[in-house]
Amino acid sequence: MENLLLIVAFTALGGISSATIAAALFWLPGTTRDRVLPHAVSFATGTLLATALLALVPHAMSGAGPFKVHGVGVALLAGIALFFVLEKFLLWRHCHTEAVETAHAHEHHRQHSSGALVMIGDGFHNFIDGVLIAAAFLTDVHLGIVTAFAIMAHEIPQEVGNFAVLLHAGFSRSKALVWNILSGLTAVLGGLIGWFALRDAMPLLPYALAVAAASLLYVAVADLIPGLHRRTDPRASVAQIVWIGTGIALVAFAESLVH
């Protein structure tokens, strides 16, 4: 029961805080926002990669045992394929990389998008995140906390993009914030369903962790890193390396405290 309360708390915290921080960033002057967001994306990239490769995958392999490690690899590959298909159907990707651009550029790229459709897609995305957070908490409380914060880190630049889309669709700032928070809270529903579904199917838990790792790797490699490569000047490149390294170091430090 304690794990269930933690799952609800951290999924709710992630949904509310990421939307609130994104809204606060959007109220910053354009030049300040444009300086902050690329660093946030770089940091998120580091945390996603490290959480997947230093936390989730090792726990999945340990839980599966030496004779089922191949199955973890299959689940990891299947997860990447799943998120590729979801992205093709516009249910997964919400322009993580476009959040690095200015709000005007973002609006230009998404000017034909419907605010309601964006919220549906974002709610689906957050629901899956909630299931993955539940899988991590069912394995280990510390792993669940690290996973929840990694997902929260990559949600912030995404929510900035969603906020811009909703404003472009005619929402007021307060209404856009409320809808972003409601969309984020679908993670709580995902966490609850993940808890009840996976708790009664513990042998499947290592493979659920592998799928969770696949989701973080896919977002980092397919969405975030290509956006970072758009900035080619040496100063920006050094800053990206520093912030990616900071994200990796933070997760590695958190894992070292556990072990």
Image (cartoon, rainbow, N blue to C red):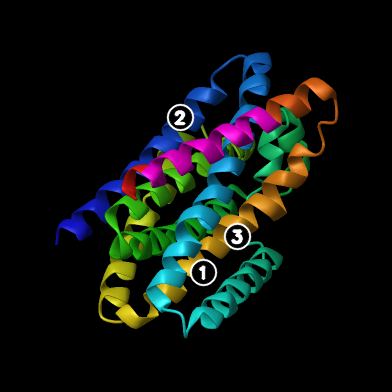
- The kind of residue on which mark 3 rests is Trp
Residue named by callout 2: 21
Residue 257: percent from left, percent from top: 34, 42
Q: Residue furthest left?
A: 1
- Name the mark nearer the viewer: 1 or 2: 1
Residue named by callout 3: 92
- The kind of residue on which mark 1 rests is Val
Question: Magenta segment, which residues?
Answer: 241-256
Compared with residue 26, is residue 153 higher up or lower down, i.e. above or below? below
Q: Is residue 245 magenta?
A: yes
Residue named by callout 1: 211
Binning the other alpha carbons within 10 Å of mark 2 as few (below 14), some (14 to 19) or many (20 upward) gives: some
Q: Main secondary structure of the magenta part?
A: helix
Residue lying at 57% horizontally and 71% vertically, measured from the top left: 76
Residue lying at 76% horizontally and 24% vertically, measured from the top left: 236
* 58 left or right of 45 in image: left
Q: Quadrant of the N terminus?
A: bottom left
Residue 226: percent from left, percent from top: 77, 46
